[in-house]
Amino acid sequence: MSRHEQAQDNRAPGTGIPAARATEDRATEDRATEDRATEDRAADEQALEERAAAERERVAAFRTRIGAPALIDIHTHFMPERLLAKVWAYFDAAGPLVGRAWPITYRTDEQRRLEVLRGFGVRAFTSMLYPHKPGMSRSLNDWAADFAARTPDCLHTATFYAEPCASDDVRRALDQGARVFKCHLQVGGFDPRDPALDEVWGLLADAGAPVVTHCGSGPVPGAFTGPGPIGAVLERHPKLRLVVAHLGMPEYTEFLALAARHPEVMLDTTMAFTGFAEEAAPFPRDALPRLADLGERVLLGTDFPNIPYPYADALESLEERTGLGPAWLRAVCHDNAARVCGLD
């Protein structure tokens, strides 16, 4: 091979640049790209922390105004990471049960989500999870038991589905120490009057465990949502400590009436009164006196982290749009759940 051919052979393919220099240039470019990515991540983290600090101040100011040393949030979601990723993807796609754009505000890892809640002064919270088909409940409950064991401020949460093993699943969860249950009639798509659940409701009524139930028809009606199906369950199990999620949105007045007829029924405030909810399903202002009368049976819920607005918005919306005053808000945001969940 001639010297000229050897020189050509040492050049980077398709260029007139020596191969060694081309490799060095690529390495320099790669380092520069990595440095820019690192700087961008640092900037994003700084911006996130600045927003978080501002929001912590808003939540702390709210707690001061209502005289609550801490918050208890009865409706928060923690679940296996793979399942949560699928839930977020469903929201991202505005799936049929969502029906509108729904950006996730707190799309971070589990540890960061816990830090955020604790930074807001949330003293206790739940790990609401729910099956969308048979055969999921037991594994979800095992995960929730482990999560509660390693997360002392989480109220041990469990779930169930309308299937032949439902009573065994619930009995097993109670034996594991479950204190709160989640029932999602919209996502599960099952009838709460299903004979497979009759023993379940009896077990939960006897245990006195609050059952946070998505039984309202928002954001999209389900086959068995609305006050009728779950109302029939309450007729059979009047001691059931049902917690109607989202104040029964959008059937607010019907679920307020249900609570008035059944002294063990409670409601949680999840998403109610926020601008996001008011746009689609405004709470009727003439029903506020009835909500005030049920003050000892209304519990704070937020749907954290799966909310399309800051956590502080949910609290300030309750304050501004109900006008029910600090004592009512203090009971809703702390005292009622402390009593119901035995945290006094």
Image (tube, rainbow, N blue to C red):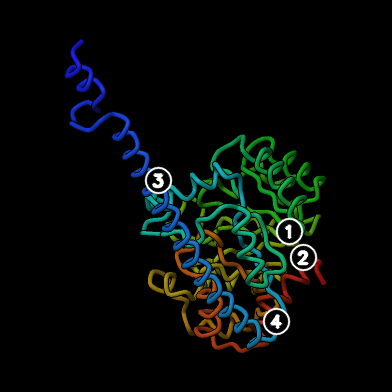
Tell me how many marks there are.
4
CB of mark 3 within 8 Å of CB of mark 2?
no
For label 1, the residue is 155
Judged left or right of residue 59, residue 286 is: left
Observer-side mark, 3 or 2, equals: 3
Judged left or right of residue 134, residue 21 is: left
Q: Disc 1 marks which amino acid?
A: Leu
Residue drawn at point x = 31 percent, y = 40 percent: 25
Q: Disc 4 marks which amino acid?
A: Ala
Residue 261 - label: none
**Mark 3 and mark 4: Cα distance apart in space:** 51 Å
Judged left or right of residue 201, residue 214 is: left
CB of mark 2 within 8 Å of CB of mark 1?
yes
Horizontal and vertical percent for residue 69?
72, 80
**Mark 1 and mark 4: Cα distance apart in space:** 19 Å
CB of mark 3 within 8 Å of CB of mark 4?
no
Horizontal and vertical percent for residue 233?
65, 55
**Mark 3 and mark 1: Cα distance apart in space:** 47 Å
Disc 3 packing (10 Å; few <14; some 14–19; many ≥20): few
Observer-side mark, 2 or 1, equals: 1
For label 4, the residue is 68
Q: Tag 2 or tag 4, which sits nearer the N-term?
A: 4
Q: Disc 2 marks which amino acid?
A: Cys
The part of the image, by quadrant, that contains residue 324 is bottom right
